[in-house]
Amino acid sequence: MKCVICQRGETSAGKTTVTLERDYMTLVVKGVPAQICENCGEAYVDEEITSRLLQTVEEAVKAGVRVDVREYVAA
């Protein structure tokens, strides 16, 4: 797909790091599958993976996590 940010590059499958913050908590997830723009590096994570990441953040908040760095694990 064409990148909506730079309007020049095409995306291809790759991995990215996603940082999510909520209130006092920061969660960093490495190795997240994404479409990455070859020109500007913008990462696009699909809806299913985004949903899983948001669920992970909710679980971490409930567990009282303040800062956590994790490797993405596919379901």
Image: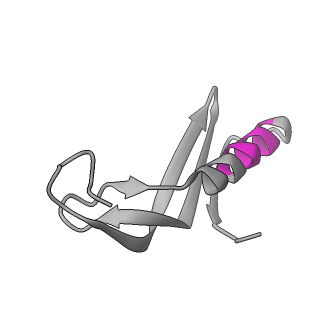
Q: Position of residue 25 (x, y in %)?
A: 65, 36
At x 58%, y 59%, the residue is 29
At x 68%, y 47%, the residue is 51
Left-right relation of 61 to 44? right
At x 41%, y 64%, the residue is 35
Quarter occupied by residue 64: top right
Between 26 and 45, the one nearer to me in the picture: 45
Between 23 and 58, the one nearer to me in the picture: 58
Left-right relation of 10 to 56? left
**As drawn, which residue projects farthest toward the right?**
63
Q: Position of residue 65 (x, y in %)?
A: 75, 43
Q: Which residues are magenta?
A: 53-61
Q: Give the main secondary structure of the magenta stretch.
A: helix
Q: Position of residue 10 (x, y in %)?
A: 25, 65
Q: Check the image and report above or below for 20 versus 14.
A: above
Left-right relation of 19 to 51? left
Between 65 and 4, the one nearer to me in the picture: 4
**As drawn, which residue projects farthest toward the left?**
8
Q: Check the image and report above or below for 21 versus 1.
A: above
Q: Check the image and report above or below for 12 versus 29.
A: below
Q: Quadrant of the C terminus?
A: bottom right
Q: Position of residue 18 (x, y in %)?
A: 50, 53
Q: Check the image and report above or below for 16 versus 48.
A: below
**As drawn, which residue projects farthest toward the top?**
23
Left-right relation of 68 to 8? right
